[in-house]
């Protein structure tokens, strides 16, 4: 039995969409710490970029919803580093909206960002990876909303459910050169999400979680490192739940104060 080496991405190239803040920022930092060359993208340049020591992620302003711009992002990575080994499709999100009154334009934009854009970027990445002797890996960052929708998230939940099925479909088509997997993220404590969890800093929400805490971005980053590594060489089309066991059912909480 041959044991894969530790999570060492030295000489590897990683693209992280939405890698300038929140989860994506920490994912990019984690790959940098593991030795990778990292390119992140966002709609506009951030005040600071992910870094580890003296190594800093490169940045490209990109609207991943635009097919040409998404393809140019992958071209940029190859032009800089001569290869592409990992794509982390992290860009996404949505404000809550009332499904009864939300506009068609809103729905189209949410589906474009959370489903169509990951497909578009993955297509471009696959074209490069299929030409490499050792292929590559794609990780799609999903949401527990794909399995357990909440009020106000109809368009987002539908798009994320689509992303999960898309992952499984592409895993069938692009193997063995390219592995593609999905992470179901649960409640994550980030600066931008703080207001969502209430005025008590999320204490009441935390009581609904078996692990007794919300996830932090590094929990998702660690899962990305695993799925992109040789340790996951036979993991393809998987849905890795990083949600701490989910949430207690409402009926349980109602009877166990």
Image (cartoon, helix red, strand yellow):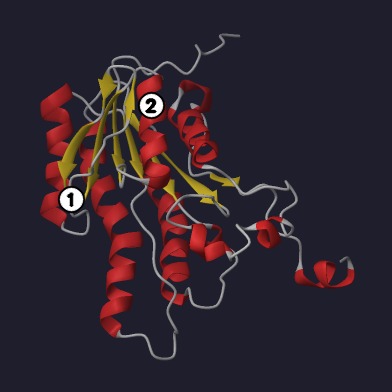
Tell me the distance, in whole angstroms, between the alpha carbons under discs 1 and 2: 22 Å
Residue ID for mark 1: 44
Residue 155 x/y as whole percent: 41, 74
* Res. 46 image quadrant: top left
Vertical placement of residue 103 versus 85, above or below? below
Residue 169 x/y as whole percent: 42, 52
Residue 141 x/y as whole percent: 43, 48
Q: Is residue 103 left or right of residue 160?
A: left
* Res. 180 image quadrant: top left
Q: Is residue 15 left or right of residue 23?
A: left
Q: Nearer the viewer, residue 137 or 194?
A: 194
Q: What label does residue 31 carry, if any?
A: 2
Vertical placement of residue 174 versus 167, above or below? above
Q: Residue at x 48, y 26 (%)?
A: 233
Which quadrant, please, contains the N terminus? Answer: top right
Vertical placement of residue 179 versus 230, above or below? below
Residue 236, can we see it?
yes
Q: Residue at x 31, y 85 (%)?
A: 103
Q: Residue at x 38, y 26 (%)?
A: 31
Name the N-terminal-most of marks 1 and 2.
Answer: 2
Q: Nearer the viewer, residue 232 or 205?
A: 205
Residue 196 x/y as whole percent: 52, 65
Report helix, strand or loop for mark 1.
loop
Which quadrant, please, contains the C terminus? Answer: bottom right
Check the image and name the residue furthest to the front. 199
Cβ–Cβ below 8 Å for labels 1 and 2? no
Check the image and name the residue furthest to the right. 255
């Amino acid at each position: 039995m041959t044991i894969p080496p530790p999570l060492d991405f030295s000489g590897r190239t990683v693209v992280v969409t939405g890698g300038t803040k929140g989860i994506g920022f920490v994912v990019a930092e984690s790959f940098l710490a593991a030795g990778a060359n990292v390119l992140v993208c966002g709609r506009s340049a951030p005040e600071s970029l992910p870094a580890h020591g003296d190594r800093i992620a490169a940045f490209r302003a990109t609207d991943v919803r635009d097919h040409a711009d998404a393809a140019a992002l992958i071209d940029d990575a190859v032009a800089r580093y001569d290869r592409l080994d990992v794509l982390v499709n992290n860009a996404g999100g949505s404000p809550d909206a009332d499904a009864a009154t939300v506009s068609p334009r809103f729905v189209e934009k949410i589906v474009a960002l959370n489903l169509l854009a990951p497909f578009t970027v993955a297509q471009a990445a696959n074209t490069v990876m299929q030409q490499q002797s050792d292929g590559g890996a794609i990780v799609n960052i999903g949401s527990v909303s794909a399995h357990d929708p909440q009020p106000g998230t109809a368009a987002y939940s539908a798009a994320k459910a689509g992303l999960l099925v898309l992952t499984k479909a592409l895993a069938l088509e692009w193997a063995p050169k390219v592995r593609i997997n999905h992470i179901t993220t649960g409640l994550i404590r980030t600066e931008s999400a703080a207001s969502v969890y209430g005025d008590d800093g999320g204490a009441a929400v935390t009581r609904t979680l078996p692990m007794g805490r919300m996830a932090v971005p590094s929990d998702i980053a660690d899962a990305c490192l695993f799925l992109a590594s040789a340790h996951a060489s036979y993991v393809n089309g998987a849905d890795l739940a990083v949600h701490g066991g989910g949430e207690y059912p409402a009926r349980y909480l109602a009877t166990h104060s």
